[in-house]
């Protein structure tokens, strides 16, 4: 993680600079959140800068990525149907472009780092290549698996964190008292020379955002063991696919008081009575197959949110109230967020 921190910080700086250049203007914070996380993913996964933050333009692969997620969200319950659709010429559209793009990125990285390269890997794909060279049991066993790992890296390394960041800005705009508290705590931390990305209230905001808007709303599929499984008083036969939908469990009043409200303080000492079972919060999944990129994603969120809080006041753009953003988000396996139009104005009251 320490090796990746300078790359994340450099992109957080570019993110803030891009917002400064658009101070007082209407911006799509959903789009800019994806610019940031996609650029970070490029540096960390491929040692490649995609330059979206500098150019202020969407990379064509993002469109294809979201088309892929639309397919996954629609056909995940019937995967054989998705395989049929992929075999029909012309039906895949930008999804096919995205697949080719991902494979190309993996091929380019392999060409730069051949299998006999003895240097220490400096990005995620280089570690995959080294694992293949070392015949590590965790390494991709086939070229197909290698390319699939590339697609997962691109989606999980950018889309999920980007949607969480956009949702955090939505909640902070609709809850100005929470944003003002964050700004005050950021100011105090900076004034004392501390690390503003390590503020407990900042983590509480991120945690509460992930509770209300988990990036994989329906959860991941799991297979029960051959001997079956007893859950409370319910018997589930062996080799049965089960899911635990995060969106539903995170909003169940049996697990959280006032479950539909955005209340970051529930994750601090002052509000610990508001969550009845912390195990009911699992946006990164649990067990052996939990998200390996959790700490990296949290690092990106902390850097971006605390920097925005230090520099800007947030407000909705004219004719924007955030309702469409909140209500029209789609569960496409990962969450796909609509546009969110904000205006960021330079803070006048920051005290460092």
Image: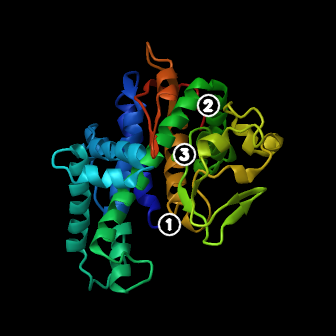
Badge 3 marks a residue whose secondary structure is loop
Out of 143 and 39, give the one closest to the viewer. Answer: 143
Residue extending furthest toward the right: 273
Q: Which mark is residue 179?
A: 2
Question: Disc 3 to disc 1, how far (Cα)?
Answer: 32 Å
Q: Which mark is residue 2?
A: 1
Out of 93 and 113, give the one closest to the viewer. Answer: 93
Are the residues tagged 2 and 3 within 8 Å (C-beta)? Answer: no
Q: Residues within 10 Å of mark 3 (few under 14, many from 20)?
A: many
Q: Where 24 sits versus 243, above or below?
A: above
Q: Residue at x 38, y 67 (%)?
A: 124
Coordinates of residue 342 in the picture (x, y in percent):
44, 24
Tell me: 107 left or right of 232. Answer: left
Q: Residues within 10 Å of mark 1 (few under 14, many from 20)?
A: few
Q: Residue at x 53, y 60 (%)?
A: 291
Q: Which mark is residue 218?
A: 3
């Amino acid at each position: 993680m320490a090796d990746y921190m300078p790359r994340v910080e450099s992109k957080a700086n570019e993110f803030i600079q891009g917002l400064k250049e658009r101070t007082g203007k209407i911006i799509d914070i959903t789009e800019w959140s994806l610019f940031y996380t996609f650029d970070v993913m490029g540096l960390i996964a491929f040692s490649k800068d995609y330059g979206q933050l500098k150019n202020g333009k969407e990379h064509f692969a993002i469109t294809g990525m979201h088309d892929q997620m639309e397919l996954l969200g629609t056909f995940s319950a019937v995967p054989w149907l998705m395989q049929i659709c992929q075999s029909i010429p012309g039906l895949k559209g930008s999804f096919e472009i995205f697949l080719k793009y991902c494979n190309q990125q993996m091929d380019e990285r392999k060409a730069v780092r051949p299998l006999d390269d003895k240097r220490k890997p400096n990005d995620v794909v280089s570690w995959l290549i080294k694992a293949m060279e070392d015949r590590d049991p965790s390494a991709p066993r086939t070229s197909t698996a290698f390319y699939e790992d590339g697609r997962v890296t691109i989606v999980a390394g950018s889309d999920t964190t980007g949607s969480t960041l956009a949702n955090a800005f939505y909640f902070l705009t609709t809850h100005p008292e929470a944003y003002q508290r964050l700004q005050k705590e950021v100011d105090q931390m900076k004034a004392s020379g501390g690390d503003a990305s390590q503020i407990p209230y900042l983590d509480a905001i991120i945690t509460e955002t992930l509770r209300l808007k988990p990036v994989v709303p329906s959860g991941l599929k799991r297979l029960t063991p051959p001997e079956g499984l007893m859950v409370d008083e319910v018997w589930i036969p062996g080799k049965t696919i089960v899911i635990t939908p995060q969106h539903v469990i995170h909003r169940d009043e049996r697990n959280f008081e006032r479950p539909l409200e955005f209340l970051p303080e529930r994750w601090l000492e002052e509000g610990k009575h508001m969550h009845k079972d912390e195990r009911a919060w699992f946006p990164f999944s649990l067990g052996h197959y939990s998200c390996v990129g959790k700490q990296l994603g949290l690092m990106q969120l902390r850097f971006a949110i605390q920097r925005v809080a230090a520099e800007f006041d947030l407000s909705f753009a004219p004719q924007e109230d955030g309702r469409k953003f909140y209500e029209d988000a789609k569960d496409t396996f990962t969450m796909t967020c609509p546009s969110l139009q904000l205006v960021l104005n330079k803070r006048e009251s920051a005290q460092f």
